[in-house]
Amino acid sequence: LHDALPILLNATEKSGYQQLLVELDKQKLQPARILHVWSCRQNTVDVSEHVDCGFRSVFKLTQALMEQKSDGWVGMLYVYPDRHPAFAAGSALAKTVRLENPKFLYRTLALTNTEIESQVDVVLDEFQNAADTNARYDDKQRQIAAWTEYTPGSDDEQSALKDDGVYVITGGAGGLGQIFVDHFARHTKARFVLTGRSELNADKNAWLCELNSSGERVVYLQADVSRREQV
C-alpha cells in the first residue's frame, strides 16, 4: 500500500480485514484476487490455531468482503497443508461460499509438501491459470477430486456395524439422523446413543418409542457436542 501503515491482522477478528479493505478503497484499489496461504505457516499441533488460520480467517475475510458490496467478482485461492482435517474445514467453507455467491470465485489447493517455499511455482500457476475448483498436489503430481458412482452390494453383504457395538450419532434426532438410525436399526442389532442440543418433541419421542418397541436399543441424550463439559 502506498503511504500506508502496516496492518496487523488477527485471523479471527473481522475488524482487521475491514480496515485493510478501507485502506485499499482509499487508494482506489479493489481486491480481485486473493492468495490465502496463512494455513501453510502453521507448524504447531494446536487444532485451534489450525482452525483460526484456516476456517475462521477465510470466514472473517469473506464477511468483510461481502459487507463491502463490491460490484466486481473476487477470486481467492485457499492453500493449505494436506496433513490435518482442521485445515480442510477452510476448504469446505470456500466451496460453500462459491456455491452461494457466484461473485466469489473461491478455489482450494491442498499441498502434501508443506514447504511452501519449494512450491511457489505450483501455487502461482494455480493462482493465475487453473480453472478447477479444488486441486491437490502430491509432490509434483496434480490431482482433482471426482465423483464415482457407488454400486451397492448384495443384501447379505456384511455390515460395517457390529451387532454388539454401541454407536454415537450426533444430531441423531434430526432429519438426516433419523434416516440413518432407521436404516441401522433395521439392519443391525447394535445399540445407538443419539445426541442433540434440543429436547425431543412429542413426534420425536413417539419415533424413539417405536424404535425401542422390540427392546431398548436407542437412547437420546441432550448435549451440545461443541461444548467440552457437556461431552
Image: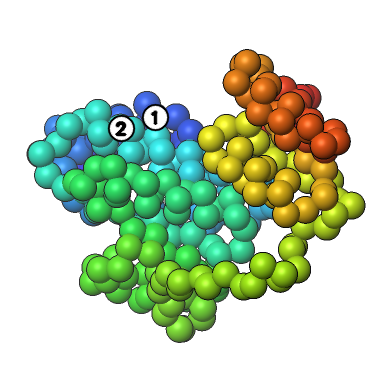
Q: Is residue 195 left or right of residue 87?
A: right
Instruction: Count how many numbered circles sit on residues in the image.
Output: 2
Residue toward you, 150 or 189: 189
Q: Is residue 189 left or right of residue 133?
A: right
Are the residues tagged 1 and 2 within 8 Å (C-beta)? yes
Q: Is residue 145 visible to the viewer in this orientation of the structure?
A: no
Q: Quadrant of the C terminus?
A: top right
x 45%, y 51%: residue: 92
| Percent position of residue 183, x then y | 65, 49
Residue toward you, 56 or 29: 56
Q: Quadrant of the N terminus?
A: top left
Residue 61 quadrant: top left
| Above or below, 154 relative to 65 | below
Give the crowd class for mark 1: few <14, some 14-19, many >=20 residues within 10 Å: some
| Percent position of residue 164, x then y | 89, 52
Mark 2 lies on a secondary structure that is helix
Q: Is residue 90 visible to the viewer in this orientation of the structure?
A: yes
Q: Where does label 2 land, which residue? A: 64
x 67%, y 67%: residue: 155
| Above or below, 144 relative to 79 | below
Q: Amino acid at mark 2?
A: Ala
x 68%, y 21%: residue: 205
> How are the colours assigned in the image?
rainbow
Measured Cα–Cα span from mark 1 to mark 2: 6 Å
Mark 1 lies on a secondary structure that is helix
| Percent position of residue 89, x then y | 51, 49
Q: Where does label 1 land, which residue? A: 14
Which is more N-terminal, label 2 or label 1?
Answer: 1
